[in-house]
Image: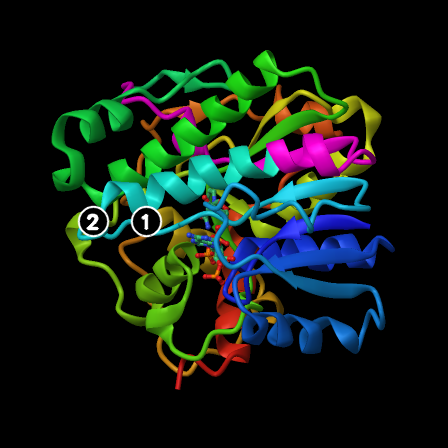
């Protein structure tokens, strides 16, 4: 049995749960409320009868929050954390659940989870991004400092992006510091995804309620983009199936302990590249959409953005390749259509 921190609205975590279940594990999912647990129970019971159950952990900032959840589990995947960029939300509302939620989990596992051998924590490429110019190549040796500085200087007036990034930096550093100071029976691996695309299978009923990364794809295709934006960076990316596979591999494979795994494709595509990659797919690989697909201005994008050294690092360590942009985008759109969110 693995413990997985998630929620009915958790885009990434639900895919991680599904992948654990597909590989034969029993999954205990922590949720904030029973109603959220019911959605997940219904989602998984059909294909994986009896192997998913949930436990309510209403407030991950409470010091004893995880004490019950960690009992009897062999591994833990900690995915749940505030994941949005809303400027109006206080810095503490990002940082406390990220940092305290993680530290409380580690402390509970140390005390009440004697069988826990490894904990995989979902961090973010936000923890490595500084403001470098091309041709700089980011790697897992880099640390983001500017976001923490912005939050330290501006407090709640800092941007939502900076607050989110700071929450991930501080959580990753807090886990590493805690581990350095405490002798425990488990190790920790951080998985650092970039923008995660893929079919939403969470409990979502409107485009506005989509998780932040899938919502971007929705907006690019439904609303289209102004020509001035097309050549600019859309951000590094990764398919959610690859993120999920990395989490499960980390708990399964002895050799993946104590890593900082940047799970990201190397390139940072321009928005135009997103349209081009999608339109380059054969017809059969593109979902039928109830609106004309934007084409942008083909050929407008260059390739002068910083890259990630993921081919030499995460892909080599994991031993498999990350999916390409067009395939991820097509599957994201197909998933949004399956949820009925285009009508
Ligand atoms: P979602 O917004 O879809 O899910 C966030 C999850 O965290 C939900 O399960 C939510 O639970 C839970 N959560 C949020 N705030 C709290 C809180 N205060 N206390 C307890 N649980 C909370 O985001 P994603 O699935 O995309 O993100 C999941 C993880 O992946 C995060 O750690 C994020 O930083 C990381 N990540 C995501 C990327 C992306 O592009 N999506 C990129 C890089 C990293 P509930 O359902 O109860 O609200």
Residue 105 drawn at (x, y percent): 59, 39
Which residue sits furthest bottom?
343
- Residue drawn where x is 74% and y is 31% of the image: 118
- Residue drawn where x is 57% and y is 44% of the image: 64
Residue 231 drawn at (x, y percent): 25, 43
How was this image coloured? rainbow
From where the camera sits, is residue 231 visible?
Answer: yes
**Which SS class for mark 1?**
helix
Residue 238 drawn at (x, y percent): 53, 44
Write down the quadrant of residue 143 in the picture: top left
- Was residue 29 drawn as part of the magenta stretch in this picture? no
- Side of 37 relative to 163 (left or right): right
- Residue drawn where x is 23% and y is 59% of the image: 225
Q: Which residue is mark 1?
A: 271
- Was residue 124 drawn as part of the magenta stretch in this picture? yes
Magenta residues, as a range? 107-133
Write down the quadrant of residue 13 in the picture: bottom right
Q: Are marks 2 and 1 in contact (CB under 8 Å)?
A: yes
**Which SS class for mark 2?**
helix
Q: Is mark 2 within 8 Å of ligand 1?
A: no
Q: Is residue 117 above or below residue 204?
A: above
Task: Report the front residue among 293 and 104.
Answer: 104
Q: Which residue is mark 2?
A: 229
Number of numbered labels in the structure image: 2
């Amino acid at each position: 049995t693995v413990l997985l921190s998630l929620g009915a609205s958790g885009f990434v975590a639900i895919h991680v749960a599904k992948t654990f279940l597909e590989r034969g594990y029993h999954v205990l999912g922590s949720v904030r409320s029973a109603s959220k647990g019911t959605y997940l129970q219904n989602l998984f019971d059909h294909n994986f009868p009896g192997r998913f159950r949930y436990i309510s952990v209403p407030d991950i900032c409470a010091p004893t929050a995880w004490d019950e959840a960690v009992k009897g589990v062999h591994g833990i995947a900690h995915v749940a954390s505030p994941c949005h960029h809303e400027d109006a939300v206080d810095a503490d509302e990002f940082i406390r659940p990220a940092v305290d939620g993680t530290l409380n989990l580690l402390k509970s596992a140390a005390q009440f989870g004697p069988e826990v051998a490894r904990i995989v924590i979902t961090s973010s490429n936000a923890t490595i991004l500084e403001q470098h110019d091309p041709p700089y190549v980011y790697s897992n040796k880099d640390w983001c400092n500017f976001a923490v500085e912005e939050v330290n200087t501006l407090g709640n007036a800092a941007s939502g992006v900076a607050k989110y990034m700071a929450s991930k930096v501080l959580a990753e550093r807090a886990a590493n510091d805690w581990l350095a100071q405490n002798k425990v029976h488990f190790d920790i691996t951080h998985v650092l995804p970039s923008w995660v695309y893929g079919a939403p299978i969470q409990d979502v009923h409107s485009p506005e309620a989509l998780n932040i990364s899938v919502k971007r794809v929705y907006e690019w295709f439904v609303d289209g983009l102004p020509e001035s934006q097309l050549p600019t960076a859309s951000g590094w990316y990764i398919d959610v199936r690859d993120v999920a596979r990395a989490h499960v591999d980390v708990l399964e494979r002895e050799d993946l302990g104590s890593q900082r795994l940047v799970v990201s494709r190397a390139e940072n595509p321009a928005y135009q590249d997103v349209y081009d990659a999608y339109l380059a797919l054969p017809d059969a690989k593109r979902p039928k959409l109830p609106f004309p697909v934007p084409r942008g201005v083909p050929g407008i994008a260059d390739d002068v953005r910083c890259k990630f050294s993921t081919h030499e690092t995460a892909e080599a360590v994991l031993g498999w390749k990350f999916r390409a942009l067009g395939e991820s985008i097509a599957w994201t759109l197909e998933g949004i259509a399956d949820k009925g969110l285009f009508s």
